[in-house]
Amino acid sequence: MEGKPAEPVIIAEGIRKRFKSYEKSHSKGFLSSLRRDYKSIDALKGINLRVNAGDMIALLGKNGSGKSTMIKILTGVLHPDSGKALVLGLDPWKDRIKLAMRIGVVFGAHDQLYWNIPALDTFEFRRELYGIGPSEYHKRLEYFVRILNLKGVYKRPVRELSLGERMKCNFVASILHLPEVVFLDEPTIGVDLPSSFALRDALMDMNRRYGTTFIIATHVIDDVKILARNMLIIDRGRIVYSGDSKGISHMFGDMREVVVYSRARLEAPRVKGINIIEHTDDYIKFEIPGRMVTDRYLSAFLSSKKVVDFSVSEPELSNVLHKFYTNKTRGASSAI
Amino acid sequence: MGEKYNLDGIARNVHIFALMQRYMWKEVMVYRASALFLLFAVALGPLINFTFITIIYTVSSGIAGWSYYQLLLLGGVSSTAVSLMYYFVQPWGLTNLMKEGGLDIYLTRPYSPYLTVLALGNPYSLSSAGTGIIIIIYSMIHLSMTALQAAEFIVMLALGLAVLITFMVIFSLGVYKLMRSANWTHSLINIFSEFASYPLTIYGVMGIFVLSFIIPVGIATYYPVAIFSGKLGISTLAGMAAISIAFIYIFKRLFYKELKNYTSAHG
Amino acid sequence: MQYSLRRGVLKYLALFKLDFKNEASYRLDLTLSIVTKIAGPLVMVFVWSVVFLSSHVSSIGAYSLDGMIAYFFSISLVELMLYTNLPYIMEFDFKRGRIAANLTMPMSYIGLRIVSALFSTLIWVVLVGLPLFVIIVFAFHITLTLQRLALFAASMLIGLLISLLLDFIIGCMSVFTNDINGITAFYEIGSGLLGGAIIPLSLFPQYLGKIMYVLPFQFMFYVPISEFTGVGAVGVQSFWIGIAWLAAFVAIGYVLWKFAFKRATSVGG
């Protein structure tokens, strides 16, 4: 983009949100269900966040970490207890209607579609709701039908569609007005692989074509790997990491994974910082610090006549995140 | 995109409401036979009160100061008002939707959340409202009226209905805030609408107060009929109209304040 | 044999405990439901008081003012034993395929569903019905002889079974319709009107009363209430009508169940 740097499209400062949760006693007695206790839960404990235009951000975190709560505050669904949030320069709570014209929200758990009639009816409802002109509407519909492979799908009653087809139609309904910022809350959960791929392709294409900013709360690692340039990890109501996947790997010593297939059992190489993951008679898998990739002991090991094949790669993001969640860091720093 | 629209304008809100109604009815009529049968069954509801009043006036002289047709009119107005209230807002449906986080998708749409709530009522109630209107017309044919009486009746009924609907919205939010479940509200609302199907004067001062100002169902039922029948004068009309406008304003403000307590599927 | 009986009892006791916890899970919900069931007849107290006063009479039909009010409070009492959720539960079972899971349980499906419905009713009878029964007896000075109590119990049992069978029949019909909301609405309004839930059947014009006395709905409200309050009591021949209707509904239910089960299990959820 030329000219002066654009203002961030999302600014959040000190966002806090507390919920009161009603707990029922689960003892065996008949009357146990009549007793009730209350518990306060701090879903968000001071979130600070900036997202620039055109970003594709993955929001990660365990169940109950605060991801959905944060999205709901940024979209005007929930009111924060304290703090400030601005999306496209608008307060999501006070300027909800104005903001709704410029953002799209896709909830995995609840869809926009009328159940007994074709998705096309929902699209036409949304067209009138957002004031999209007829020719522009047909152009966009054609685009989304093509990119999401919805031919023959969007004219059938929604109740007859598979989950994947419904999610794709829901996606179209939610972004038909080509919003500037799109929030997605677990959009591919339970969805078949072809539909997931189609949704990801659509997101990337929209980002390229229209510069749409995407915030995606997800558990699906492939969504993170393929879509997101940056990720935010929320844990117990706070952002504990903000950066790209390389950055998070660095937190764990920037490891590399080495897989070696051999004719006979091999002894592990004497490389500083090695961590054996698996070791059988014809296979060994280990981790080494990234800087040790050019180590001569490793080179000698991999050049052995017993070695049939080998690969050196960055560790699976899922493994890195698993370590993060279980707090197995080596020299990790908490960010932001 | 959309900037040409006055997003808060009445015309736009009416247009969006009509749009939502169109698609709601389209969905209802997908299973035409089932829908029509249910509409017919629901339409029979007001006949219960009609039957009761007819039998009372057959076996006795009824309620002093109220003729058969006046009481039928009151019953008809009560059925119509409560049915229309359910058409716009259904407390247990709304509370359950809020409890499950189903309101989320509506709150991200470019129209007022108040409009959202008003579009989530029970479409089938329209048929019982229709029966109520038929009973109203039938009663009025047998009662003498002037154009002024008719106008006063319509004004008070419209204001009363607005009060009832706005009250029921805030009542639903209150139930959501305190209890998260509204399964018992159906019976409670039916009891109060049953009370409002008869002249409030039979319940004494306390009853009149409760049914006019605490659960204001009487504003939509008793007062329009009593004003029409000449039992209450123009000063009462003016007073109740002012109170109605105040109620509508207060309830609507309370709605936006209480919406902050919405927790989606959490809590 | 003893083992099977013990296991059978434990099985249904577990079911009752689950149903009770389910009904009681929303504490305030339950309390307010109880309050609304008791508060319902209050409007009739006011209405009939004014009607009697305005008409300057001591009785309307066979009913004094006390008798009329007792009748409407008794409606709340008998209504506790009617109109279960059975049709909707069966509809869900058939349409969402839950019947598959139920058929793998060590209880017959009909046994499971009907017993569960009866348990839900029993919970309401215990929590609300018994206290209400006592209040009505003492407040309205109802003299309950052994014979009257037996006739009340018998007519209430017929009414309960008729209601349960009709619920079951409507539940079976859910396999053949898109939804049963229209049928249940029609049934509830019709049975209330024709059963005496709106006004005692004896106050209807004679030509209408003759029709209502041969219909099954009178056993849901009018007959049990008449036996309970001792006002407008019906003859023994009415009980034969009730039993005949019971037999008819059992036969209809059996035939419908055969068709419904076949259809539900052949196409799945």
Image: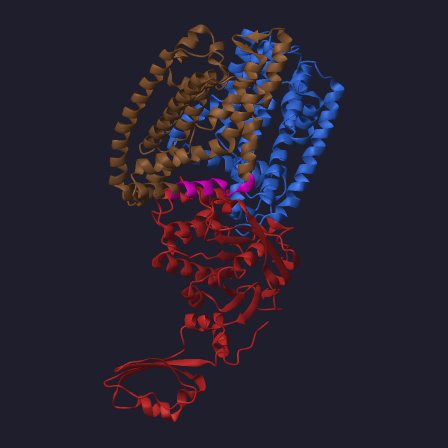
* Chain shown in blue: B
Magenta span: chief secondary structure? helix
Which image quadrant: the N terminus of chain A?
bottom right
Relative height, residue C194 to residue A256 (above, below):
above
Nearest to the observer: residue C38 or residue B257: C38
Which image quadrant: the C terminus of chain A?
bottom right
Instruction: Name the residue located 43 percent from the left edge and 29 percent from the top edge.
Output: C83
Colour logic: by chain
Answer whether residue C25 is magenta in the image. Answer: yes
Residue A143 in the image: state x and y as whole percent: 42, 53
Residue A291 in the image: state x and y as whole percent: 45, 87
B189 relative to A304 in the view: left or right: right
Q: Which residues fall within the magenta stretch?
A: C14-28
B148 relative to B139 in the view: left or right: right
Answer whether residue B256 is magenta in the image. Answer: no
Q: Is residue C88 visible?
A: no
Q: Colour of chain A?
A: red
Relative height, residue B255 to residue B232 (above, below):
below
Residue C56 in the image: state x and y as whole percent: 63, 6
Instruction: Name the residue located 38 percent from the left edge and 31 percent from the top edge.
Output: C180
Residue that extends furthest to the right in the rendered view of this protein: B235
Question: Exactly how many numbered labels are in the figure?
Answer: 0
Q: Is residue B184 visible?
A: yes
Nearest to the observer: residue C157 or residue C72: C157
Relative height, residue A189 to residue C169 (above, below):
below
Residue A113 in the image: state x and y as whole percent: 44, 45
Relative height, residue B116 to residue B131 (above, below):
below
* Chain shown in brown: C
Instruction: Name the residue located 53 percent from the left edge and 54 percent from the top edge.
Output: A179
Residue C102 occupies quadrant: top left
